[in-house]
Image (cartoon, helix red, strand yellow):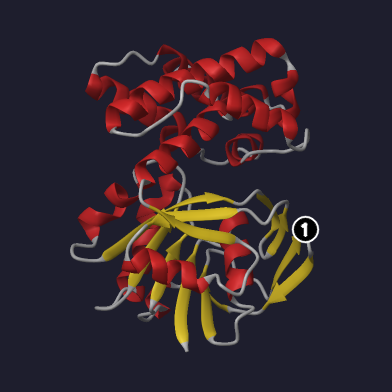
Amino acid sequence: MQKIAIVGPGAVGGTVAAWLAQNPDFDVTVCARTAFDELKVETPDGDIAASPTVLTDPAAATAVDWVLVCTKAYDTAGALTWLKGLVGPKTRIAVLQNGVEHVERFAPHLPGAVIVPAVVDIPAERAAPGRIRQRRMGTILVPSGDAGEAFVGLFAHTPIAVSTTDDFKTAAWRKLALNCAGAVNALTLKPSGVAHREPIAEIMKALVAECVSVGRAEGADLPDDLGQSVVDGYRSGPADGVNSLHADRAAGRPMELDARNGVIVRRGAQHGIATPMNAMIVALIEAAAAQGDGRP
């Protein structure tokens, strides 16, 4: 019996937990702020349900074989409170978060731990604790190696396409290109269909072009036409699609703005690469979401 803990049962975490719990050989625990009785996920192939153990107190956590960190990138500190109890000598930790700094967020706090970064593309939305709509089965990509292969094996019984890659850096920066363009949705509070407006598409492509420049400086292999590919993806998907940055801003929640756009600005500055479009959209979203009269 493999013991698996999911930290952060939001849209992605809850979906992953529900699918893993379909395997009777897995003992799945969900670490959450709010207790719920059951996970119910509306998937493209029909509804699934699961009743994992739900913990709300980090002090109750005990060591497991795998920890899947599915919190937002800005809530790394919150995830670490759980890892103190969940991580034992043989625990592997998969980080299913946005951005390109998966390992950097956790390695300083977990010396010697096996950390597996993951690029996740599972469009899903949480309606309430334990209630999720999964729009597409989606994919998860992890680095090649023993730990990566073991992670892939966890999902062998699920329809989620989980695989390894020899070039994880490129995969992470390609996903970042998609995510950085999605800041337009958070700024306008318009769903994916807004990409059909040509001026919006041009802004998206400009954001991605900066991401490509910085990603290449970091060692990623990114094509010149990635911006157009990102726009085409938005246009071919559901027009009512809402990304997590948009959803968080609309709900007045904290946003992963730094992990999706701020990181491009920060890493660009390190390489001497100008990133005015990403810097501008970060400033505009922060101002639009600020309370009061707009002063810092």
Q: What residue sits 42% from the left and 18% below the top? A: 279
- Residue 38 vs residue 87: left or right? right
Query: Outermost residue, left direction?
Result: 111
Question: How many marks can you see?
Answer: 1
* Label 1 crowd bin: few (<14), some (14–19), many (20+), radius 10 Å: few
Q: Which residue is mark 1?
A: 44
Work out whether residue 188 or residue 24 is closer to the camera in this orientation and state it. Answer: 24
> Quadrant of the image for the C terminus?
top left
Work out whether residue 16 or residue 75 is closer to the camera in this orientation and state it. Answer: 16
Q: What residue sits 55% from the left and 18% below the top? A: 205
Res. 87 image quadrant: bottom left
Query: Outermost residue, top direction?
Result: 199
The amino acid type, in three-letter code, at marker 1 is Pro
- Residue 131 vs residue 94: left or right? right
Residue 275 visible here = yes
Percent position of residue 57, x then y:
45, 73
Work out whether residue 96 or residue 163 is closer to the camera in this orientation and state it. Answer: 163
Q: Is residue 230 above or below residue 150?
A: above
Q: What residue sits 40% from the left and 28% below the top? A: 262
- Residue 67 vs residue 132: left or right? left
Residue 67 visible here = no
Q: What residue sits 63% from the left and 39% below the top? A: 243
Percent position of residue 188, x then y:
66, 22
Q: Is residue 134 above or below residue 114?
A: above
Percent position of residue 113, x then y:
24, 66
Percent position of residue 251, x then y:
65, 40
Secondary structure beneath label 1: loop
Q: Is residue 71 above or below residue 92?
A: above
